[in-house]
Amino acid sequence: MNNPQQRPVITVLTAPDDARPPGLEPLLEMAEVRFAWDVESLRQAMPGTQMMMVTDFRTGVLPGAWELADELKWIHATSAGVDALMFDELINSDVVVTNAQGIFDRTIAEYVLCTILMFNKDFPNSIRLQLRHQWQHRDTERTEGQRVLVVGAGSIGRQIARLTSAIGLEVHGIARRARDSDPDFVAVHDNDALPEQLGLADFVVIAAPLTPATEGMFDAQAFKAMKSSARLINIGRGPIVKTADLVAALQAGEIAGAGLDVFEEEPLPETHPLWDMENVLITAHMAGDFIGWTRALTEQFLENFANWQQARELFNVVDKASGYVPGR
């Protein structure tokens, strides 16, 4: 892909307030590295750029500099989701897009397992009682034998299935296509089976990417299909859930609770009713972020960059039309 006698040009696109990614020192020795953070700086950096490393998964500045992408061959997103990056000109181009699949899978699965146990063992109420110095004995739920439905049976969904099944949960998945047999799921059902499967699950975990097909998937109708004792956990993308419908379902008792790491609007406004619901757990889009994750993302890019230099196949190549790495 690259002439080894030439020094490749790489542009690193960050959020305006972000520091430069750690661990770039080896890249600085091998390539000309430019930095951009907004449309103006990206327009200056884009001519001659062959590769981009995009660290801001919310960025929307790329279309504003696209006309100057005269040598661009490859864009790497340091996130699992690439929905914010996608626009028609990129989708229809020959530019390869890769993502950070694999970096966050295990820690997101740990987050989901923790959330399930917190709900079943009533830890939110225990914490509230502790803050009030109040001793109150309660019975809590047994986790073994409960049913989990993972919507999005890709690499993150698979790790969720492995961890939750290890403690005795019965894990089913939803994917574009059903799978007759899968080593990590009791069964994987196709999208058409979602309404039926929602009515059988004790926990519904959203692990799907944001695409036109998944945006707004969890609406009033979906919540009505769930068991009144079920909880929703969203570690996918916020817009997959219609927040107003979720609030209404929680208030009406159509579902028993929700553990939310992502939201339609981020940060979640201080006055939003979700903050004050005792059956809701809220975290700040951090389910996969472990100590050292930013360096791990750089190391992953460097590994793929070595493939690029040696004209080897890149890994984690995104199907731009569908918005994720095939194989989900």
Image (cartoon, rainbow, N blue to C red):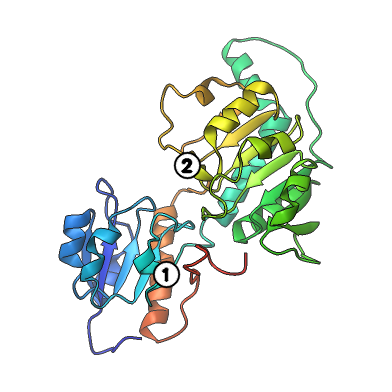
Q: Return the residue nearer the eye: 243 or 98.
A: 243
User: Could you tell me residue 84's position as x and y percent?
Assistant: 40, 54
Between 153 and 170, the residue placed more toward the observer is 153
Which of the marked residues, 2 or 1, is nearer the chain's N terminus? 1
Q: Would residue 98 be seen by someone viewing this image from the given angle?
A: yes
Viewer can see residue 279: no
Residue 289, x across and y down, in percent:
48, 48
Q: Quadrant of residue 189?
A: bottom right
Instruction: Tell me, yes or no, whether the two marked residues, 2 and 1, touch with CB atoms within 8 Å.
Output: no
Q: Secondary structure at mark 2?
A: loop
Residue found at the very far right of the displayed protein: 145
Amino acid type for the residue under numbered disc 1 = Val
Q: Which residue is mark 2?
A: 285
Q: CA distance from mark 2 to mark 1?
A: 23 Å
Left or right: residue 58 versus residue 136 is left
Q: Which residue is mark 1?
A: 97
